């Protein structure tokens, strides 16, 4: 019997064959990296980011990562709506990697037998080979290792980009993440003065397109393949049913709200692999913002809202000045409130009456 | 959900039924047919120390609501929240707007959800006409009484909060609400899922918050923290009681989208009604009795 899954794999198998010749490394001039130090770093699930140096204390290194692709059913809102998720390392978004400019990134990508689809990875930070996509296409039961040189500093999206219509489908099923390539001497302001952060949070934004039944209820599917045919027309409508941070509505609120304190400087990296967005910290600002995420450009200052182009990641540095509960939103407020793009910061510390004070509490309008 | 008055179990309701029967000494069968109503629980008259819902301020600083001792006369309130099927009858009669409730995953009867304050008031009016009784939303005070041991109100803690730093209260409230939130499962549950409280009221404090007739108030307090300097009432916004207290604009049907940028919103908005023993019932019965005797 010819199943949809076989059809999907069949198409990709052909392109995999086409991609095979360049996979033999001997064809290219071998680079000897044996003199470079290597470090193997374990990735952590967003919004957290693995420990890293802001200023490199060594020369270029080879940084080894492993990511296992996991197809799984994920709940994406508080109504129990499910997505046939495709994930890098089990999380939506995939984990954030941090290296320094000039480092080599050596990623082992694993597609376990338990998955149903071929996958690959396209690093916007990488040069050539469709960002690595042409060299990393693997079927279930396979793994591959890609090395690329991080030549440009900045925050860059990575995503799955297997073939044709599979590309947007895999991306809106959750397969995207970010790599941050720091300048070796760290972040700087427009005058070259060092900028440092005490905490970094990675907020990945996703747009989901969940089909509905005739009664208007979201449909749950058994497998990614089962969901594909219904999902495609919803995707083509370009109106997401969900726009969320960290994979689900409310994923960064309540017990999972991000935390800080007055006086602490936080770097917020925001990615959107598919669609434009506009982060805004309600009651706060972007002190220094690399809207396009590329650290060789001077940061913009004092922003109220910053624009993240679809297919990019940006970074905003902010020092909290006032305690409270801050909502961090996509300032298309319909998307923030109705579709899910809201996160919270819980910030403790001393209130500054100079910055804000309620001079007259709300009360009746005086009559003379 | 059972409707017929004969199915009501609570003793107090039986008394009401008796009085109806007593009034309708002639043609009682026909009267009983006309006077159908959902089961209610009679809440005995009580005196309650009650922190009034709203925002209380002293020189601009949020204060705990003054706890006032309030007399609550006896009242009869629906044992269960209004059901989806019950509400559907009002919709079928053209008197209510279809609820925004999703199709229930349970085959058993569930409470109506996705209803605004306007919807609740419209249903009460319609139910009054078809049952011959007068129905209304409970006040927040009545809701507090019928909630019994499950009443939570607000958790403003004067001691824990810092009047010089409003963020302390914001953060505490945010964390309290988060802690109060059970694992997310807003799918309306069959009647009885959340059990019956000590007063016999079913399902209060589950995943359906209940509209009340109490308006939102903002009160300026004097330095004694009790005497009111000012009071502004906004009756386009009403109080809901449930696992925690919520304040919503009257037109909101989905609590999750009706909240502010921060805070934990209610899972679902629904309601239950108080049955008034008042005049309309008597008038209607008198009218019917007169009709029976050909006046």
Image: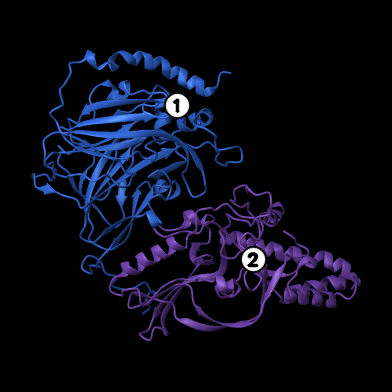
Chain colours: A blue, B purple
Vertical position of residue A119 compared to residue A248: above or below: above
Residue A260 location (% of width, % of height):
27, 57
Residue position for label 2:
B202
Residue position for label 1:
A117
- Pick the front one: A310 or A162: A162
Q: Distance between the residues labelled 2 and 1?
A: 49 Å
Indicate the quadrant where residue A147 lies: top left
A223 relative to B77 in the view: left or right:
left
**Element type where label 1 sits in the image:** loop
Vertical position of residue B246 compared to residue A67: above or below: below
- Count of numbered labels shown in the rendering: 2
Residue at 29%, 26% in the rendered image:
A145
- Pick the front one: A323 or B57: A323
B264 relative to B29 in the view: left or right:
left
* Discs 2 and 1 share one subunit: no
Residue B173 location (% of width, % of height):
40, 66
Q: Can residue A274 be seen in this view?
A: no
- Pick the front one: A325 or A117: A117
A264 relative to B31 in the view: left or right:
left
- Pick the front one: B158 or A309: B158
Quadrant assignment for the N terminus of chain A: top right
Tell which subunit mark 2 falls on: B
Q: Is residue B140 visible?
A: yes
Residue B161 location (% of width, % of height):
34, 73
Indicate the quadrant where residue B193 lies: bottom right
Q: Residues within 10 Å of mark 1 (few under 14, many from 20)?
A: many
Residue at 53%, 23% in the rendered image:
A4
Residue A195 location (% of width, % of height):
14, 48
């Amino acid at each position: 019997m010819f199943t949809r899954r076989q059809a999907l794999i069949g198409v990709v198998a052909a392109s995999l064959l086409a991609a095979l010749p360049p996979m033999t490394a001997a064809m290219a001039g071998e680079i000897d990296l044996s003199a470079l130090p290597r470090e193997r770093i374990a990735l952590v699930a967003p919004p957290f980011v693995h420990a890293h140096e802001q200023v490199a204390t060594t020369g270029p290194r080879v940084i080894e990562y492993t990511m296992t692709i996991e197809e799984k059913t994920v709940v994406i809102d508080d109504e129990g709506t499910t997505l046939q998720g495709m994930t890098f390392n089990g999380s939506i978004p995939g984990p954030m990697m941090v290296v320094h400019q000039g480092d080599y990134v050596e990623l082992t990508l694993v597609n376990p037998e338990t998955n149903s689809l071929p996958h690959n990875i396209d690093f916007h930070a990488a040069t050539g080979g469709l960002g690595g996509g042409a060299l990393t296409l693997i079927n279930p039961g396979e793994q591959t290792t890609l090395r690329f040189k991080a030549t440009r500093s900045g925050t860059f999206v990575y995503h799955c980009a297997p073939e044709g219509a599979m590309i947007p489908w895999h991306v809106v099923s959750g397969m995207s993440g970010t790599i941050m390539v720091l300048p070796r001497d760290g972040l700087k302001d427009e005058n070259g003065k060092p900028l440092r952060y005490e905490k970094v949070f990675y907020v990945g934004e996703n747009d989901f397109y969940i089909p509905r039944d005739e009664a208007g209820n979201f449909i749950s599917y058994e497998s990614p393949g089962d969901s594909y045919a219904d999902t495609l027309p919803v995707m083509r409508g370009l109106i997401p049913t969900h726009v969320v941070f960290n994979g689900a509505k409310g994923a960064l609120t309540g017990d999972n709200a991000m935390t800080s304190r007055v006086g602490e400087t936080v770097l917020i990296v925001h990615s959107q692999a598919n669609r434009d967005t506009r982060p805004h910290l309600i009651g706060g600002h972007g002190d220094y913002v690399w809207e396009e995420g590329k650290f060789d450009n001077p940061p913009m200052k004092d922003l109220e809202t910053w624009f993240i182009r679809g297919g990019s990641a940006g970074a905003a540095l902010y020092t909290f000045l006032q305690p409270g509960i801050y909502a961090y939103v996509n300032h298309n407020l319909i998307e923030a409130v109705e579709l899910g793009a809201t996160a919270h910061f819980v910030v403790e510390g001393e209130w500054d009456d100079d910055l804000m004070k309620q001079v007259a509490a709300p009360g009746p309008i005086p009559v003379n | 959900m059972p409707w017929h008055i004969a199915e009501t179990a609570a003793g107090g309701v039986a008394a009401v039924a008796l009085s109806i029967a007593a009034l309708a000494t002639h043609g009682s069968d026909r009267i009983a047919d006309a006077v159908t109503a959902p089961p209610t629980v009679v809440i005995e008259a009580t005196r309650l120390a009650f922190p009034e819902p709203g925002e209380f301020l002293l020189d601009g600083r949020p204060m705990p609501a003054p706890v006032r001792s309030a007399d609550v006369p006896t009242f009869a309130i629906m044992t269960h929240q209004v059901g989806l099927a019950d509400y559907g009858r009002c919709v079928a009669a053209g008197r209510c707007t279809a609820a925004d409730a999703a199709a229930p995953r349970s085959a058993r009867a569930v409470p109506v959800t996705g209803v605004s304050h306007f919807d609740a008031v419209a249903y009460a009016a319609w139910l009054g006409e078809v049952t011959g009784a007068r129905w209304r939303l409970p006040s927040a005070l009545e809701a507090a009484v019928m909630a019994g041991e499950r009443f939570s109100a607000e958790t403003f803690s004067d001691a824990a909060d810092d009047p010089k730093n409003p963020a302390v209260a914001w953060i505490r409230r945010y964390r309290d609400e988060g802690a109060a939130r059970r694992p997310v499962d807003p799918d309306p549950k069959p009647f009885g899922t959340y059990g019956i409280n000590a007063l016999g009221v079913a399902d209060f404090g589950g995943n359906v918050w209940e509209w009340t007739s109490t308006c939102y108030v903002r009160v300026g307090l004097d330095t004694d923290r009790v005497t009111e300097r000012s009071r502004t009432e906004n009756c386009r916004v009403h109080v809901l009681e449930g696992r925690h207290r919520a304040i919503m604009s009257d037109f909101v049907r989905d609590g999750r989208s009706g909240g502010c940028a921060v805070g934990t919103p209610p899972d679902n908005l629904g309601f239950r009604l108080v049955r008034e023993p008042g005049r309309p019932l008597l008038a209607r019965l008198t009218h019917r009795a007169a009709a029976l005797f050909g006046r």
